[in-house]
Image (cartoon, grey):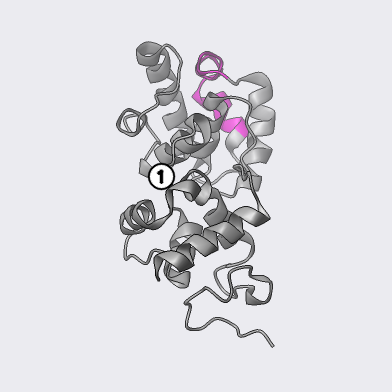
Amino acid sequence: MNKEKRTEIFRRLKELNPSPKTELVHKSNFELLVAVILSAQATDIGVNKATKGLFKVANTPEKILALGEDKLKTYIKSIGLFNGKAKNIIKTCKILIDEHASRIPQDRNTLQTLPGVGRKTANVILNNAFGQPTIAVDTHIFRVSNRTGIAPGKTVLDVELKLEKFVPDEYKLHAHHWLILHGRYTCIARKPKCDRCSIFDLCEFKKKIIKQ
């Protein structure tokens, strides 16, 4: 795919949604961090249901640490892998308190030292909390990037690095959200909704459903 096509794709996605935001409900950077840790192999809707009750009683590292692992589990037990996630969140809270004055680090390497935080999670935090033009490649972005030809790659890191290289600078800040939303609601896994796709004519997917 050439530069002109990519630029037009992101121009259209921006036109449809000028200021996209994460669908994870949060009121602070810490709440966002907890929500993103919980979102691994879970839906945003499921996470939001769990954190709605949790954040009413504990929404700071100190309060969640005081809550304790067992009590934390009662709030997030509806989410997959909740046992491991509870353990990681408690450990992360302690590290934030002891080493970072309860503040969320603003660089990827430090974020990745927190239990439960990988490269994707770190990129989500840097983008949403601190306005850095990072691109967190999840299953939706991986699929859309490969299917459309925007940034084909065999691994998540391949796709991330290609998107960083190919997405025009003016669109990098929100590229993460545009691609996720496109993959979540239009370019879905089993049967993409080509009939309602805003970038249909630019897409290089060989099996796309031709509009009648």
Out of 38 and 197, give the one closest to the viewer.
197
Q: Residue at x 66, y 46 (%)?
A: 45
* Magenta extent: 60-75
Q: Quadrant of the C terminus?
A: bottom right
Residue 63 in the image: state x and y as whole percent: 56, 15
Q: Residue at x 62, y 31 (%)?
A: 26
Residue 61, above or below 195? above
Residue 162 in the image: state x and y as whole percent: 34, 57
Q: Quadrant of the N terminus?
A: bottom left
Amino acid beneath label 1? Lys
Q: Is residue 47 left or right of residue 139?
A: right
Out of 93 and 105, give the one closest to the viewer.
105
Q: Secondary structure at mark 1?
A: helix
Q: Is residue 95 left or right of residue 184?
A: left
Q: Quadrant of residue 197?
A: bottom right
- Which residue of the protein is positioned furthest toward the bottom in this rendering? 212
Residue 137 in the image: state x and y as whole percent: 43, 52
- The residue that label 1 is drawn on is 120
- Main secondary structure found in the magenta portion: helix
Q: Is residue 171 left or right of residue 196?
A: left
Out of 183 and 44, give the one closest to the viewer.
183
- The crowding category of the residue bearing disc 1, from other C-alpha atoms within 10 Å (few below 14, some 14 to 19, many at least 20), is many
- Does 64 lie within the magenta span? yes
Residue 32 in the image: state x and y as whole percent: 55, 32
Residue 15, above or below 55? below
Does residue 41 show up?
no
